[in-house]
Image: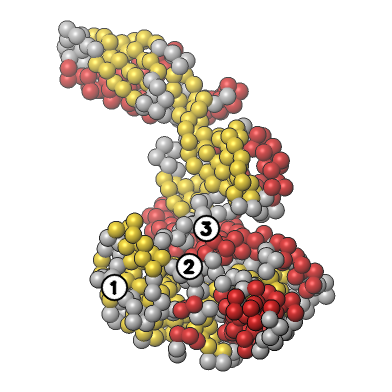
Amino acid sequence: MGVSNKRSVILLGHARSGKTTLSESLLYFCKTTTRKGTVADGTTVSDYNFDEIERKHSINSSLLFCNYKGTTIQIIDTPGYADFFGELISGIRAVDSAIIVVDATVGVEVGTEQAWQLLEKFNLPCIIFINKLDKEDADSAKILLNVKNRLSKKATTIDSIDTPDLVEVIVESDDKLLEKYLEGVKLSPEELTAGLREAVIRRKVFPVLTGSALTDQGISGILDAIAGYLPAPLERPEIKGADSFNPEVKKQILFKADAPFSAFIFKTISDPYVGQLTLLRVFSGFLSSNTSFYNVNKKTKERIGQIYILQGKEQKPIEVASYGDIVAIAKLKEAQTSDSLCDEKEQILFEPIIFPEPAISASVKPKSRQDEEKISGALTKLSLEDPTFKITRDQQTKELIISGLGDLHLDIMISRMKKRFNVEVELGTPKVPYKETIRKTAKVQGKYKRQSGGRGQYGDVWLQVEPLEKGKGFEFVNKIFGGAIPRNYIPAVEKGVLQAMSEGAIAGYSLVDMRVTLCDGSYHDVDSSDLAFQIAGAMALRKGVLEAGAVLLEPIMDVEVVIPEEYLGGISGDLNSRRGRIMGMEVGGKSQVVKAKVPLAEMFTYANDLRSITGGRGVYTMRFCHYEEVPHKIASTIISQYQASKKQAEEQG
């Protein structure tokens, strides 16, 4: 099959717009499948995972292929929910074009807009399919106007190539045709078709087609448009990579069979039977089964076995993958998502995929000792498969934290842990990693003396505690002179101080930003010991902190919220209600960017609240900025709760 007869498209659109049903229609129409599956029955080729069948919607992107009138079409079907936006971002890096699917009963929705913005970013041509015309309340004329207003004025129906409006659009994007047209020369259907193809590839026109994937209405028109107007691999928008030896130097990828091999890993999936499957797009040259490639990111050569082309969960072996192909390779040892593969002599580095930052987090605890042993491996495998799913361990709170793009995302991952890895966990709201510090200087004594027959315990220290600048951490100063405390006990005093600092003094959180000076003390020739001085040091530290005006600190986050302008007032008010300080606003494309500093304690429900306020059209990022003192009223509540739980534990103990 010649490369001019290859097409690759990604199906994009809001959830429930009918992308998976469309993929079924395309496969069935091309006689690739013998029966047409349905989402309701869980029989579609692309939604093959247990949770997709159970929930009746796409969760992962999946690869499909069909042949239409001599053209091989590779398709990536994607989920429409915002919680799985990472699947769109990775899939779009593998294709040359897209089909935007719009529901004829509701028009352009949030997911449609977000997908459109991705296409603009990567400069990919697309056609628009207004789906579900079989529904009673469908209105294609109204939805076409909606598409023009919300997506692009260049969205145009192409029912007939020689309609005056379409002819004008075509000639405007081609100087030679425009010259002929202005001279009054009648353009031939062949000239108009070629002009339209060029206009589509250059994103001067976005053809709009209508129909119903459920009843197969308009499917032949979509296939004709894919083959006739969307780009072959040679015609796709250019890609530049970096020279791996000198990343500042940009190299253009040559879309040729005789060019050096180059490919990009856009996705990794775990297959229950084959193990890890690595999905890659070949951009130049070719790769044969049972050979090897060079991984630029890992700086290693890796042997490969069989190459596959995927049809949902089925793997069809092929001998050679050439430029333009989207293929899978099993059981690679080193390769991961975003890695660049190439000929070792002609190295090129593709831009890595930039995935969205997690928007929501939860703490996880295994339900049993058995689950505790398996939890780490299960979470690692899930995070390799989905780079938007992150795992961290908070060193201060000692909690295992999972993070994702939304409640649904985390829910899916917990379900997969149970069904795929037989691991059950309990979810909770992560603890806020508060810290404690002091505001004044205090000098105190810590004396530990025990005598209960035989050798006793004796340690006596005087400590001075004083605040340090924010971020300075901890300093221990030894000012013992004249042997008031033998030198060999000094480390024990510091150890006791550090132990007490890690446990906190007012609310159980670690102490920071303070200098502790060992000023004086006394010892006993027989009864003194490391343990006694360690306990004395801890006693003095706790006492000193309480006398030095101990306060509670909380993490403050840098928050950036990107929203349509009409939600500016609502978002500003909401951030203020979270004790946030708005630092500025700026325009970002068609959106407004609100920058604020907000306490982490107020942000745990923000992902869902933002979605509710903006109808799903807002996104945000959050990064740690600094620590600030907790307002007195809130701090009093936190301290009271800690003291009460401590007292209860002591009574029960």
Query: What's under tag 2, amino acid-wise?
Result: Arg
Confirm or deny contact between disc 2 and disc 3 (CB under 8 A).
no
Q: Alpha-carbon distance for marks 3 and 1?
A: 40 Å
**Residue 414: mark in rendering:** 3
Going 61% across and 23% down the picture, which residue do you hit? 633
Q: Where is residue 222, by image quadrant?
A: bottom right
Which amino acid type is marked by label 1?
Asp
Q: Residue 93: which numbered mark, if any?
A: 2
Secondary element at tag 2: loop
**Residue at position x 70%, y 53% from top?**
615
In screen coordinates, is 610 left or right of 388? right
Which three-letter amino acid code belongs to the residue tagged 3? Ile
The answer to whether the residues at label 3 and label 1 have Cβ atoms under 8 Å apart is no
Q: CA distance from mark 1 to mark 2?
A: 20 Å
Residue 172 image position (x, y, % from top left): 65, 73
Closest to the camera, between mark 2 and mark 3, is 2
User: Residue 602 in the image: x percent, y percent?
Assistant: 59, 37
